[in-house]
Amino acid sequence: MTAIASTTQTSSSATTARPGKARNRVLWTLQILFGVFFIVASGLPKLIGQSDAVEAFREIGWGEWFRYFTGVVEVSGGIGLLVPRLSGPAAAGLSITTVLAAATQAFLLGNPTLAPFPLILAVMFAWIAYERRESFSTFTNLVNR
């Protein structure tokens, strides 16, 4: 009876953790698009000191270190979306990052009309993190080696 229970549990968890083929293709398409966006269009301008990014972070008032930190977080998250073992944790991290970006737009920069876009991204990243939830156990195994 124990063998039956463990077999049922194993097959049940395997089917719930992996998305189907069509969903997997949609996820990879989104991960590639968002990954490239966060590396090229969002993170790198902060790291190389593009004038728009510099001005926005001056308005926030937390110093240059925060611009560099945000750039590193965004580039790292974008790269993580492209690596299967890191895709879930990267999406979860970017979800938190985009919620904080929305709060920054609304409260620190005084422009709440720009907050919905990062919030939509946060929902998309939360969905990717949920669908890639099996990568969290892979990630923890990598970290605990």
Image (tube, rainbow, N blue to C red):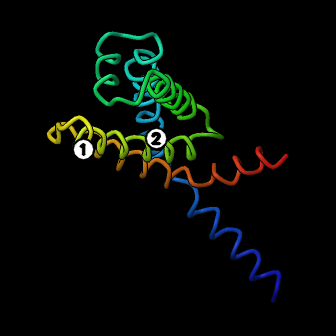
* Mark earlier in primary sequence (2, 1): 2
C-alpha gap between disc 2 and disc 1: 20 Å
Q: Residue furthest right?
A: 145
Residue at image position (39%, 23%) is: 42
Residue 88 in percent (x, y) is at 56, 46
Compared with residue 98, is residue 133 higher up or lower down, i.e. above or below? below
At 64% across and 62% down in the image, what residue appears?
14
Amino acid type indicated by mark 2: Leu
Direction from residue 53 to residue 21 in the image, left or right? right
Which circle, 2 or 1, is nearer the viewer?
1
Q: Where does the image place residue 53, in percent across and percent down from the top left?
A: 34, 18
Q: For mark 1, does the 10 Å Cα neighbourhood hold few (<14), some (14 to 19), or many (20 or more) residues?
A: few
Q: Nearer the viewer, residue 65 or 130?
A: 65
Q: Name the residue rendered at 52%, 33% in the picture.
A: 77
| Foreground of the two, 47 or 131 | 47
Q: Residue furthest bottom?
A: 1
The quadrant in which residue 57 appears is top left
Say which residue label 2 marks: 94
Please tell me whether residue 73 is drawn above or below residue 47 in the rendered image. Answer: below
**Circle 1: residue type:** Phe
Residue 135 located left or right of residue 40: right
Residue in front for this viewpoint, 133 or 63: 63
The image shows residue 93 at horizontal and vertical percentages of 51, 44
Is disc 2 placed on a helix, strand or loop? helix
Q: Nearer the viewer, residue 19 or 124?
A: 124
Residue located beneath label 1 in the image: 107
At label 2, counting other C-alpha atoms closer than 10 Å, the crowd grade (few under 14, some 14-19, many 20 or more) is many
Disc 1 secondary structure class: helix
